[in-house]
Amino acid sequence: MEPVSAAKTPFAVDLEEGTVYVWCACGKSAQQPFCDGSHKGSGITPKVFKAEKTGTAYLCACKRTGNAPFCDGTHQKL
């Protein structure tokens, strides 16, 4: 199954160093850009990551980044 694009621009989120986050990879979560379990049965697995530093990060919303969970500009080609 292909992921659903949640938006065509990244989500700017404030992350806290050392905190573990779960990024939605399927695009179906109502809590974008984070996982709410909506991927169950889709065959798509969310990305668990630990913030390396405190500050604003740009998380992928098109769900096609090559640098999950971070935006790499792929949305500009869709």
Image (spheres, rainbow, N blue to C red):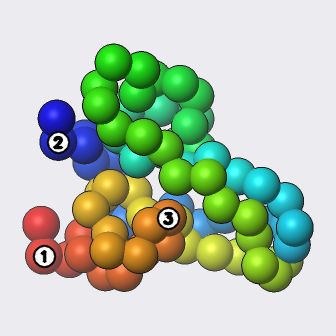
| Label 2 or label 1, whichever comes before in sequence order | 2
Q: For residue 40, which quarter of the picture?
A: top left
Q: Amino acid at mark 2?
A: Glu
| SS at circle 2 | loop
Residue 27 at x, y = what percent? 36, 40
Classify 16 as above or below 55.
above
Classify 4 as above or below 68.
above
**Is 33 left, or right, of 41 in this rendering?**
right
Mark nearest the camera among 1 and 3 is 3
**Is 34 left, or right, of 78 in this rendering?**
right
Residue 30 at x, y = what percent? 51, 29
Q: Are marks 1 and 3 in contact (CB under 8 Å)?
A: no
Residue where numbered disc 2 is placed:
2
| Label 2 or label 3, whichever comes before in sequence order | 2
Q: What residue sits 40% from the left and 27% below the top?
A: 39
| SS at circle 1 | helix
Q: Few, some or many C-alpha atoms within 10 Å of disc 2 (few <14, some 14-19, many ≥20)?
A: few
Query: Exactly how many numbered labels are in the figure?
Result: 3
Classify 78 as above or below 41.
below
Residue where numbered disc 3 is placed:
69
Between the C-alphas of marks 1 and 3, the distance is 18 Å
Classify 61 as above or below 39.
below
Q: Which mark is residue 77?
A: 1
| SS at circle 3 | loop
